[in-house]
């Protein structure tokens, strides 16, 4: 899937991702400020969670309760080495049956699951983003 969207279209975009992703592992790639967390906030809301969604930059992971599943939201921006992800039990989260959203997956290239959905986001203009969704 390849599309361009604005903030006004974020709910539709998030819904498209949830309906079309073939994996429960969603990896969000993009430069700082492209709207990865904003998109994840909308997805968590569409999944029926009333939890306050924020980027887990310092805690590395936040957990949200949706209507039918838990959602684990990772942000690996600040880690220096993949061993930090190992140390916090990242592999245990992957072995759960819940949704896993990962920001900055580039920081943990050797820990990606075998099957995942990669969502690449880039700035198209000051008020729009381009998203490419790929299945692996």
Image: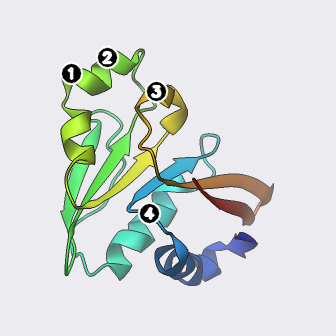
Dot 1 and dot 2 residues touching (CB under 8 Å)? yes
Mark 4 = which residue? 23
Looking at the image, residue 2 sits to the left or right of residue 44; the answer is right
Q: Say what secondary structure mark 1 lies in.
A: helix
Give the label, 2 or 4, closer to the camera.
4
Q: Residues within 10 Å of mark 2 (few under 14, many from 20)?
A: few
Rendering quarter of residue 51? bottom left
Q: Nearer the viewer, mark 1 or mark 4?
A: 4
| Image marks 3 and 1: residues in contact by CB distance under 8 Å | no
Q: Secondary structure at mark 3?
A: helix
Is the residue 77 above or below the residue 136 in the image?
above
Q: CA distance from mark 4 to mark 3?
A: 18 Å
Is 4 on the left or on the right of 41, as rendered?
A: right
| Callouts 4 and 3 close, C-beta under 8 Å | no
Discs 3, 2 touching: Cβ within 8 Å: no
Q: Report the residue marked by disc 3.
A: 110
Residue drawn where x is 20% and y is 28% of the image: 88
Look at the numbered disc 4 and give the secondary structure of its residue: loop
- Mark 4 vs 3, N-terminal side: 4
Mark 2 highlights which residue? 83
Between marks 3 and 2 in the image, the one whose residue lies nearer the viewer: 3
Vertical order, 23 against 83 (above or below) = below
Q: Position of residue 44 (x, y in %)?
A: 34, 70
């Amino acid at each position: 899937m390849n599309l361009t969207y604005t903030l006004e279209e974020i709910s539709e975009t998030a819904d498209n991702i949830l309906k079309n992703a073939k994996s429960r592992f969603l990896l969000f790639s993009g430069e700082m400020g492209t709207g990865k967390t904003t998109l994840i906030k909308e997805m968590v809301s569409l999944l029926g969670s009333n939890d306050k969604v924020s980027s887990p930059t310092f805690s590395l992971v936040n957990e949200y309760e949706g209507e039918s599943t838990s959602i684990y939201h990772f942000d690996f921006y600040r880690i220096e080495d993949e061993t930090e992800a190992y140390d916090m039990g990242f592999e245990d989260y992957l072995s759960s049956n819940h949704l896993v959203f990962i920001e900055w997956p580039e920081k943990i290239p050797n820990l990606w699951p075998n099957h995942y959905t990669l969502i690449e986001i880039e700035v198209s203009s000051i008020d729009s983003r381009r998203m490419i969704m790929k299945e692996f």
